[in-house]
Amino acid sequence: MSVIRPKPPEDPIQYDPSAVFAAGTVSRPKLDALAAPLDAARTESLADLDRWRGGGAKAGEALDPAFIDLPERLLADYNTKRPESELFAILQAARRIRDAVDRVVVLGIGGSYMGTRALFEACCHPFHNELPRGERGGRPRLSFEGFNMDNDSAQGLLDLVAPHGKPRGDDLLDRWAALVVSKSGGTLETAVATRLFLATLLNAVGGDVRRLAEVVVPVTGKTGRLADLAKAIGCPEVFDIPDGVGGRFSVFTAVGLLPASIVGIDVVRLLEGAAAMNRRFREAPVADNPVLQYVGVCHLAEVDSGATVRVLSAWSNRLEAVGLWYDQLLSESLGKAEKGATPLTAVTTRDLHSRGQQHQDGRRDKLITNLVVGEPRRDRLALPPLGAYAANQDKLDDLVGRTWPDMLAAAFAGTNEAYAGAKRPTADILLPRIDEHVIGQLLQMLMLATVVEGRLVGTNPYGQPGVEDYKQFMMRRLRP
Ligand code: PA5
């Protein structure tokens, strides 16, 4: 048997806005003329890193640019100081948890869970949680809570981990663990879920706090209520969300990497993909730079053509959670001072049967960016004949043998043709396939684009001061 393993593909993702020019929404010369401001926004975004490292944030300024070079830093440490590196610790903890339990409950909200969900849905089997453990490769199921205060959904998860309020047995298939994720450590939705699931988990381990500590892994800032709680429980492993990395930019910290690794996602390839996007972002001239071209087109479509709604149209079910993660990223970063486009995730063709009418004929306030996938991961399904019991009643015999990717490609081309006919702008982000390297590139591209656009339009992309109001008003009612 050969010991040489084939090198997995590392094809770059591409951005193609040609249909936006053809629709007349953005003109190529205007985009070219924006090169200098885009370049300056890139420089400023990268300079934020130096400013942050030098402690140069202005008084009261939110500044969280440390996500930018995080992938390279994690990989470099892993390659040079392996056992002392953060990534090594994450991989070790993931292995321990994977071997110890059959379900992991992630408790977190916003940036503390949406990235994990995006990675899980994009990179794992679409029915991971439904598969028996053997077919999951011995990886635990992954469930989410603490992202709302929905009584029945919390009860539903309790039904799974403690049916009828009783602990399950102590077999591997009955055991579960909790990852509690909160940068501030004080977010109410996550904190109340933590109490609830800690009580259930303590019951599951027979009231033994030492065993409880082994199946609770907090991921949090250096200080705060969750860090204090972790100390009180005696959790042997507590992962840090580093300073300078904000919640919605934290997918490549332990926030996303630990649960991803637990369910079998190759986190090294994710980081390599992200680092590859960083290289292109730093080095490619504006005209060949996917981040800067994407920002330029979105920005001009908004200011010149009133496209204030940005539809990310995912041509794969597996990318819906990536879209929802991006909705949060864009809204919280740029929705400030009465500015900022409104992001909207669609899954196509599904949503052509719900939103398609409006996108084709409705208000001209949308830029549609297709997230389109080059090749499927699995064997191509082909349309089978109906069988001897019937005689072409469904009138599909002429399509026998056509594959699912064929039909989706026809839908993609047909939809874009229809939009082009009505001068509706569409751009494409072309993903060669959906795997860790590609998803790493994509998430990094979208995070970089968000901060660059902020610098371009003079909006601080970091911090989310507007979210504080609801928290205060809610707490005033809970603690009058
Ligand atoms: O981007 C952000 O910072 C927010 O969306 C947070 O991730 C979210 O509010 C959760 O905060 P925390 O991780 O402190 O519980």
Image: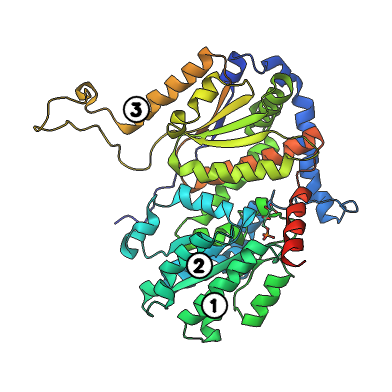
Give the residue number, with chain letter if any, for mark 1: 199
Which residue is found at the position 50% from the left and 76% from the top? 200
Give neighbour class at mark 3: few <14, some 14-19, many 20+ (Cα, 10 Å). Answer: some
**What kind of residue is marked 1?**
Ala
Marks 1 and 2 close (CB-CB < 8 Å): no
Task: Kindly identify which numbered label has been placed on residue 407.
Answer: 3
Task: Kindly identify which numbered label has been placed on residue 301.
Answer: none
**Which sits earlier in the primary sequence, circle 1 or circle 3?**
1
Whether residue 278 is visible here, answered yes or no, is no
**Which sits earlier in the primary sequence, circle 1 or circle 2?**
2
Which residue is found at the position 27% from the left and 27% from the top? 402
Coordinates of residue 193 in the picture (x, y in percent): 58, 67
Which residue is found at the position 50% from the left and 42% from the top? 320
Q: Eyeballing the image, is 165 above or below 86?
A: below
Which residue is found at the position 56% from the left and 67% from the top? 179
Question: Which colour scheme appears in the figure?
Answer: rainbow
Give the residue number, with chain letter if any, for mark 2: 94
Give the Cα separation between the discs numbered 2 and 3: 39 Å
Closer-to-camera residue (360/32): 360
Closer-to-camera residue (181/244): 181
Q: Eyeballing the image, is 475 above or below 414?
A: below
